[in-house]
Amino acid sequence: MSVQNPLRLLNLAGKTLLTNEALAISALEYLPIELFPRLFMEAFYGRHRKTLKALVQAWPFVRLPLGGLMQTPHVVTLQAVLEGLGILLTRKDRPSSSMVPMAEDGSRIEKPLVPFEVFTELHLKERTMSEFLTYLLKWVEQRDPFIHLYCKKLKMVSFPMDNIMKVLSMVQLDCIQELHVNCTWHLSTLAMIAPLLGQMSNVQKLFVSHTHLPDPEEWNEQHTVKITSQFLRLHHLQDLHLESRLYLEGCLDQMLRCLMNPLDNLSIIHCLLTDSDLTHLSQSPNISQLKSLNLSGATMTYSSPELLPSLLEKVSATLQELYLEQSGIRDSHLEAILPALSHCFQLTSFSTHGNLLSMPIMEKMLRHISELPSLGRELYTDPQESFSSLGILQPGRLAQCRAELLEILKDLGCPRTIWICFTPCPHHGDNTFYHPEPIIYGSNIPG
């Protein structure tokens, strides 16, 4: 008998049993434990509401994992699961179940019930709460404090503030490990909910984007202090992603001072970074172990040419990914960072896409980083020589430049793949390229 045959028999048994819901429910008491998960899945996908409720009440395991079933959730079946849990909780709430047999003096003493834990991921992206989320919050609220709602991953995208506050009031904030905030809020709004961020003490990944301050006259330094001070409470933060054009300007040092531990990944994109910001960034002890640094779209003054090289030198021992896309880098800027870049021996991915560079500096760069042993992904924009004086791509010039780049790779003599892409089309977004074919040189490719 093959290994798959027992699984087919279990599936068949589950489907057969569900043809008669009354029989299925009455048989749960005698059902082998190994049949419960299969029967549950069949009942869930088949939307057998009564059987689902009964299965949950008779569930023989400590955990009831719904993650894989939530890809295509159906409100009625999910409600049936919660109703079954509600009945189960009522049974567990009997006084006898909350007693220990005897205390030392012979009396019985009450023992608090262990809260029932519900884990979920929340993606708050609609203008109004979904039917199921509304039902879930009401279900939890009716059973408080016997239910703890845990959410390891929380995303908020343009969700109404009153609904956000309601959700956050129901979730155990210290269980959140990954938080995405993508809302067009004023800085004052972000400052208002900042204390809630401080309660998310186990957050490991934090993404904040599109927060804006429409009128510079409304700037209030206290708002920034309220936000950055909360980082003092985030002892497990490893990944920090910030995207906002206004609120970080000149304030990066405040946030860096409040970081409690070294970061693994840092993204500061589409922001204005002053010389002061770059100085504080390169001097911060909490970036010395960075594995990934993304400054794409960051506007840097470059008035002090030593700042960016100093930053790269600080992270060279651990850096694995470096993204400087559309950051205004020119030949002189790239040439300045080449010595530090050539020391990044852990580097696996490097991109300067969206920055126009000349053929001579590209050749110099390719030679400088040819000795990096782990570098496997390189992305650049077509050389300046590929364009006319009016900025129009010339296919003939492009072909010549690509041929020259291939000759450079051959001359270096080690297998290499580089991606040379046209500047993104403004009408189709950043991922539209004129020609995404790589330039490949390898020992198995004829010269």
Image: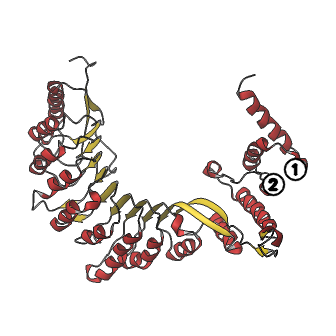
Image position, residue 255 (x, y; %): 30, 69
Quote the CA–CA distance across marks 1 and 2: 8 Å
Q: Nearer the viewer, residue 295 or 422?
A: 295
Q: Callout 2: 10 Å neighbours few (<14), some, many (20+)?
A: some
**Which residue is tagged 2?**
58
Relative to 432, say whether 104 is above or below: below
**351 and 153: which is toward the camera:** 153
- Percent from the top left, x then y, of residue 124? 53, 64
Q: Residue furthest front?
A: 105
> SS class of the residue under badge 1?
helix
Left/right placement of residue 158 relative to residue 227 reads right
How far across and how far down the image is residue 392, in percent? 17, 44
Mark 1 touching mark 2, by CB under 8 A? yes
Tag 2 or tag 1, which sits nearer the N-term?
1
User: Of the residues shown, which amino acid type is indicated by label 1?
Assistant: Glu
Within-10-Å neighbours for mark 1: few <14, some 14–19, many 20+: few
Q: Quadrant of residue 82?
A: bottom right
Residue located 24% across and 16% down the image: 446
- Tell me the tag on residue 29: 1
Image quadrant where residue 258 sits: bottom left
Q: Is residue 376 above or below residue 93?
A: above
Q: Which mark is residue 107?
A: none
| Left or right: where 188 falls relative to 254 | right
Q: Nearer the viewer, residue 406 or 235?
A: 235
Task: State which quarter of the image contains the N terminus.
Answer: top right
Q: Is residue 164 left or right of residue 275?
A: right
Image spot of residue 301 (x, y percent) = 14, 62
